Amino acid sequence: MGMASSTSEFVLDPALDAAIGQAAETLTQSSYCVALTGAGISVESGIPPFRGPGGLWTKYGEPPMDGYQRFLADPAGAWRERLAPTAPWAQALRDTLGAAKPNPAHRALVELERRGRCGSVITQNIDDLHSQAGTQSLLEIHGNHRLLRCLECMRRFEPDAVDVDPNALPPRCPECGGVVKGDTVHFGEPIPPEVLRRCYQEVERADCMLVVGTSGTV
């Protein structure tokens, strides 16, 4: 869309209109489409990117690049930090994610899924907004900030399904007794094998990829 005129009408950019038409034709002619989403899709929901102008890490500094190794070395300490964050970026991220709501882009992917035009959504985001919007076939490759995960059996849990006793950290998995951490994938942590396997399956099946809000660089 071009800028609004003085009469509040929008002037359609012919090049953009043609590009949208070509993308729509590619999507409708595909037999199986998969969407890949990144931080850009959630900016309109009030979640800034991590890096770049206005990014959380640009403002507060990046978290440790060995976050997973630190967790394994001291899971109780990591849990104390999770329950009462001291790092400014961690508290800012928690507050931002807690206030965010799905925007029209999240809802558009839900509508494409409903119409049978998008088979699944693979997201790099941890913000839970695709789930809140209603996406059914969702692969959260970096986890979900709301959930917990057992490092042994890899089951994911709602927070109230795990007994988190501040005097007996780290909490243990109610299914296998393994150590539980937040579901978000830390720096240095392998992507959980089941979600990675399913991502490969979906991408191998697809003949159309809808990339939204990510450069795909990482």
Image (cartoon, helix red, strand yellow):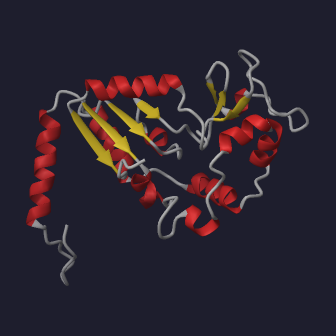
- Name the side, left or right, on which 53 lies relative to 31: right
Picture layout, residue 69 above or below residue 16: above
Q: Write down the quadrant of residue 154 in the picture.
A: top right
The percent coordinates of residue 69 (x first, y second) are 69, 39
Q: Nearer the viewer, residue 159 or 180?
A: 180
- Name the side, left or right, on which 185 lies relative to 86: left
Residue, x 60% and y 36% (percent of image)?
A: 189
Q: Which residue of the protein is positioned furthest toward the top in this rendering? A: 176
The percent coordinates of residue 139 (x first, y second) are 44, 32
Picture layout, residue 11 above or below residue 119: below
The percent coordinates of residue 87 (x first, y second) are 73, 58
How many numbered markers are drawn? 0
Q: Nearer the viewer, residue 197 or 12?
A: 197
- Name the side, left or right, on which 37 lies relative to 148: left
Q: Which residue of the protein is positioned furthest toward the right in this rendering? A: 167
Residue, x 26% and y 24% (percent of image)?
A: 205
| Quarter of the image that includes the N terminus | bottom left
The percent coordinates of residue 19 (x first, y second) are 13, 55
